[in-house]
Amino acid sequence: MKFGVTVVPRVSDWKLFVDLETMGYDCAWAADSQMLYSDAYAVLALAAANTSRIRLGTGVSVASTSSRPAVCSSASAPGTPRCASWARTP
């Protein structure tokens, strides 16, 4: 069984990802909400630079507020080749 957790991304709390890796979690997701939290990608970048085993990603990425290439390039970091692109039509 694998365990994961969703984290509220605050730049000041990036060390939480290191603690989660130490506790044995397999993955951690940062919620993407620029209106409520720090930038999820900045927090994940700090976490990725300081962890080695835990899988990191955004729980939900708000594509309408980010460019698709930025979302896809960060989603396809080494070991996590997952990216979906979508379009909504009226």
Image (cartoon, rainbow, N blue to C red):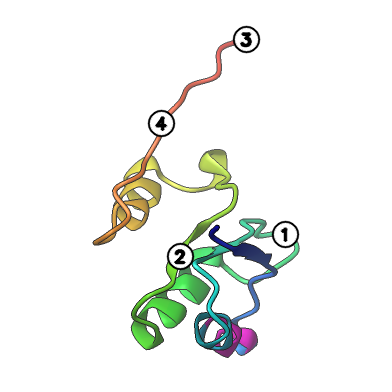
Question: Which portion, as a residue range, is magenta?
Answer: 13-17
Secondary structure, mark 2, is strand
Residue farthest along the right direction in this orientation: 36
Task: Choose between 61 and 68: the one closer to the eye.
Answer: 61
Residue at mark 3: 90
Give the numbered dot on residue 56. 2
Query: Which amino acid, mark 1?
Result: Met
- The x and y percentages for residue 53 are 37, 76
Q: In terms of image quadrants, where is residue 36?
A: bottom right
First reached walking from the N terminus: tag 4 or tag 2 = 2
Measured Cα–Cα span from mark 4 to mark 1: 22 Å
> Can you name the residue that lies furthest to the left here?
78
User: Mark 3 to mark 2: distance in Å?
Assistant: 33 Å
Residue located farthest toward the top when viewing the structure as drawn: 90
Q: Residue at x 39, y 88 (%)?
A: 50
Q: Identify residue for label 1.
A: 35
Q: Is residue 40 magenta?
A: no
Please tell me which residue is depicted at 54% across the width and 60% down the height of the picture. 2
Q: Amino acid at mark 4?
A: Ser
Whichever of callouts 4 and 3 sits on the residue coming sooner in the sequence is: 4
Can you tell which mark lies on residue 85? 4
Q: Secondary structure at mark 1?
A: loop
